[in-house]
Image (spheres, rainbow, N blue to C red):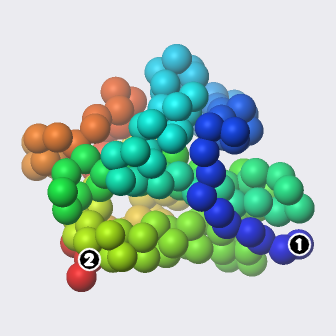
């Protein structure tokens, strides 16, 4: 199984929607729909045009993971859409770690020093993952003014990179 990670655009919207909604709704019972996430239908205008990016992780042509960066300030971005299909998670393939490292490298190359993210309290493994990667939990009121809030998020993290 060869892992390929590459930036994706609108041509992958349907695959991204399928991957992400399946995990959100079926695996974690999060009451969220595609209409709550219009960015998934406009990847290029939402992520790329503002200076961010959206990456897909592929194994044998199948989209098995994703991560995105919304650039919301000159030197700040927010991680969005960090998902890996259940059967592809874990240390063996290390997809989540590789995706995060690609995003951080992109931030360094584009002089984005501060990365924020929101997640949901039910996603315990995600919280442990971010904490292992030196993200620090912060209060909602300490988020930057322009941080793009998602209504479902109730836990927030930040990391400053050099």
Q: Which mark is residue 91?
A: none
**Residue 55 x, y percent position in the rendering:** 58, 57
**Residue at 65% across / 63% down in the picture?**
6
- Up/down of 127 relative to 152, above or below: below
**Residue at 53% across / 39% down in the picture?**
43
Q: Nearer the viewer, residue 88 or 5?
A: 5
Which residue in the protein does label 2 denote?
Answer: 161
Q: Secondary structure at mark 1?
A: loop
Quick one: quadrant of the N terminus? bottom right
Which residue in the protein does label 1 denote?
Answer: 1
**Residue 98 x, y percent position in the rendering:** 59, 74
- Up/down of 113 relative to 76, above or below: below
Question: Does residue 56 show up?
Answer: yes
The Cα atoms of the two marked residues, 2 and 1, are separated by 32 Å
**Residue at 20% across / 62% down in the picture?**
75
**Residue 4 x, y percent position in the rendering:** 74, 69
Q: Give the residue at the far front of this rendering.
A: 49
């Amino acid at each position: 199984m060869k892992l390929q990670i590459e930036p994706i655009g609108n041509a992958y919207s349907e695959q991204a929607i399928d991957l992400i909604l399946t995990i959100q709704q079926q695996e974690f019972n999060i009451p969220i729909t595609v209409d709550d996430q219009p960015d998934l239908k406009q990847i290029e205008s939402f992520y790329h045009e503002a200076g961010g990016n959206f990456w897909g992780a592929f194994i044998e042509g199948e989209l098995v993971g994703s991560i995105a960066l919304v650039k919301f300030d000159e030197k700040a971005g927010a991680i969005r859409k960090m998902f890996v299909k259940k059967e592809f998670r874990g240390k063996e393939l290390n997809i989540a770690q590789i995706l995060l490292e690609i995003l951080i490298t992109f931030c360094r190359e584009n002089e984005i020093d501060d990365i924020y993210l929101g997640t949901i309290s039910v996603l315990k493994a995600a919280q442990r993952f971010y904490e292992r990667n030196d993200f620090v939990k912060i209060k909602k009121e300490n988020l930057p003014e322009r941080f793009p809030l998602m209504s479902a998020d109730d836990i927030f993290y930040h990391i400053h990179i050099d």
